[in-house]
Amino acid sequence: MKYDAIIFDLDGTAIPNAQSGIPSPQLSKITNANSENNLSAATGRAWEDARPVIKALGLTKPCIIGGGAMIINPDSEDILWQEVISVEAA
């Protein structure tokens, strides 16, 4: 079976469930070696907290951040899409 993309969670999947968790050297080696494939992460973390993990994994494809509130290009750190709750709704 061929996949167009593989999107995986960070906490509890790519790293231990810990705020300061980092990916294992083995996982980093695998993701960095497969950077030409469509590997991406999805996380409930804010970009500031997800950045070190995503960078360590060498991910270059857009990643889903903040529980789906943002899609960001990890290379340029440009926000490709974002949906925020209005102050009135919050």
Image: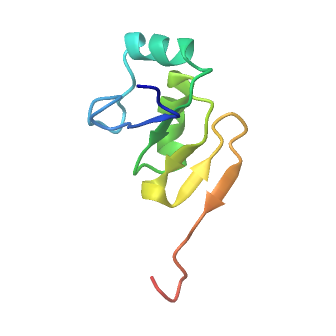
Q: In the image, 9: left or right of 87?
A: left
Q: Is residue 73 above or below residue 16?
A: below
- Residue at horizontal 45 percent and vertical 82 percent from the top: 90
Q: In the image, 13: left or right of 5?
A: left
Q: Is residue 29 above or below residue 60?
A: above
Q: Position of residue 79 (x, y in %)?
A: 67, 52
**How is the structure coloured here?**
rainbow
Q: Is residue 69 above or below residue 13?
A: below
In terms of depth relative to the viewer, which is nearer, 13 or 23?
13
- Residue at horizontal 42 percent and vertical 56 percent from the top: 67
Image quadrant occupied by the N terminus:
top left
Q: Position of residue 46 (x, y in %)?
A: 48, 51
In terms of depth relative to the viewer, which is nearer, 64 or 25?
64
- Residue at horizontal 47 percent and vertical 43 percent from the top: 49
In terms of depth relative to the viewer, which is nearer, 46 or 32?
32
Q: How many marks?
A: 0
In terms of depth relative to the viewer, which is nearer, 23 or 2?
2
- Residue at horizontal 29 percent and vertical 36 percent from the top: 18
Q: Position of residue 70 (x, y in %)?
A: 56, 56
In the current view of this chain or complex, which residue is farthest to the front? 1
Q: In the image, 60: left or right of 52?
A: right
Q: Position of residue 19 (x, y in %)?
A: 34, 39
